[in-house]
Image (cartoon, rainbow, N blue to C red):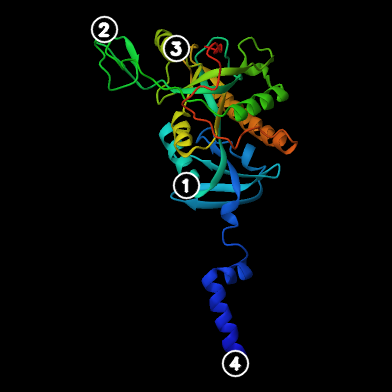
Amino acid sequence: MRANSWLRDGLRCLATGSLLMILFGSASAASKVTYYGILMPLAPKNYSVLLSHLEDARTQVIGGFTFHTGTLSGIPVVACVQPVDGDATRALVAQKMMDAFSLRAMIYAGTSGSHLKRLRIGDVLIARRVVDFGNYITTRSGRIIPGEFHDTESNAAGSGAMMYLYPSVPLSDLAYRAAMSMKPETPAWMNQNDKPSMAYIMDYGTQGSSAMWLRNPKAIRESDRIFHEADESGGYGTALASLINKVPFVELNVMSDNALQVPTKFDTYFHRSSLYAQQLAYEIVLRMFEMIKAGDVPLDLDRYRDMMRSPYPADTRWNH
C-alpha cells in the first residue's frame, strides 16, 4: 500500500514537473543564465588571450560551431571562434549563438585596415555606426551609388539608398571608457619612425564592412565620400542579426594595417601587427568585464533601442 501511494504521488509530481525539480532542480535553470556573447575572428589565432581568462570553462558543439562558456570577472559569457573567415560566417555564428543561448549583449572585437591617415596601426576605433560599404552599384560612367536594386541611370526615387546601423550606446560608451583607461601604447617597431606612441582611441567612427579590401587611394576616397567608413572590417552582418533578434551590439577594432600605405605587404611585420592588434582588442574586452564587475554596469542596457534609428543629435560630428 505504501509503495503504491509513493508511486501514485510520484506520477502526480511527474505530471506537474515537480518531481524533476526535486531530483534535478529547476529544469529551466540553465536557460535562465543570461550571457554576454563574444564573437572571435578566425585570424589571427591568438584566442588564448581571451579564452585563458575563462573561469569554469566548458565547451559544446552546436550545429558545427564550438561555443566556450564560462565567466569573465564573474560575469557569464559565451564565446565562439568563427570556423570560416568573413562577415557572412560571423553573422551565422551570431545567429546560432542567439538561438542557443539567452544573450544580454553581443560583442565583436577584431582588427581592421584604416581608411584614414590619422587612424594608424595600433589605434582603436569604437564603431558608433556600421555600414555595408561593399553594397553598391556603379553607373555606366563608373560613379558609385550605395545600395542595390535601384535605377542607376537617373535620379529616380530610392536611388542612392543605404542603411546605417547604430550599435548600443551604453556598450559603446563602456568600450570607449575601457580603451581609454588602458592608455595603450603602440610599440616602436610598429611605427614608421621607430618611436613608441600613445594609441589614438577614435570615438564616433563609422565601421565599414565589406568582403573586399580597398588598397587604391582613389577608390578609398570615392567610397569614403559616400559611406564615410573610417576602416574596413566585417561586423555589419552581425549587427543585422542583433537587430533582428533585438540584442544590444557593440563593435570595436584595432588597426592592424593602413590601407593608404599601398601596397600592404603580407610579411612578418604584417603578421606581428595583426597579432598585436587582436591582442589589444581582446584586452579591451577583458577590461570591459572588469569594469562591469567593479560596478560600471552599462545603464539602460536591457532597454533595446532600434538600431536603424540614430540615437545621436543630427549635428554629431562623425570622424571620417
The image quadrant where one finds the N terminus is bottom right
Residue 129 seen from this side: yes
Q: In the image, what residue occupies the spot 58% across and 35% down? A: 303
Q: Residue under circle 1? A: 99
Q: Nearer the viewer, mark 1 or mark 2?
A: 1
Q: Which amino acid does label 3 sit on?
A: Asp
Query: How far apart are the two marked residues, 2 and 3, measured between alpha carbons?
Result: 19 Å
Mark 4 or mark 2, which is nearer the start of the sequence? 4
User: Height in image: 219 above or below 256?
Assistant: above
Which one is nearer the viewer's eye here, 231 or 98?
98
Q: Which of the 4 quarters of the picture holds residue 311?
A: top right
Mark 4 or mark 1, which is nearer the start of the sequence? 4
- Say which mark, if any, is on residue 283: none
Q: In the image, what residue occupies the spot 57% across and 58% down? A: 28
Which one is nearer the viewer's eye here, 63 or 25?
25
Q: Which residue lies furthest to the right in this view?
A: 294
- Say which mark, if any, is on residue 224: 3
Q: Residue under circle 2? A: 141
Query: How far apart are the two marked residues, 1 and 4, measured between alpha carbons?
Result: 48 Å
- Residue 125 x %, y %: 58, 21
Q: What residue type is labelled 4?
A: Met
Q: Residue under circle 4? A: 1
Query: How far apart are the two marked residues, 2 and 4, measured between alpha carbons?
Result: 92 Å
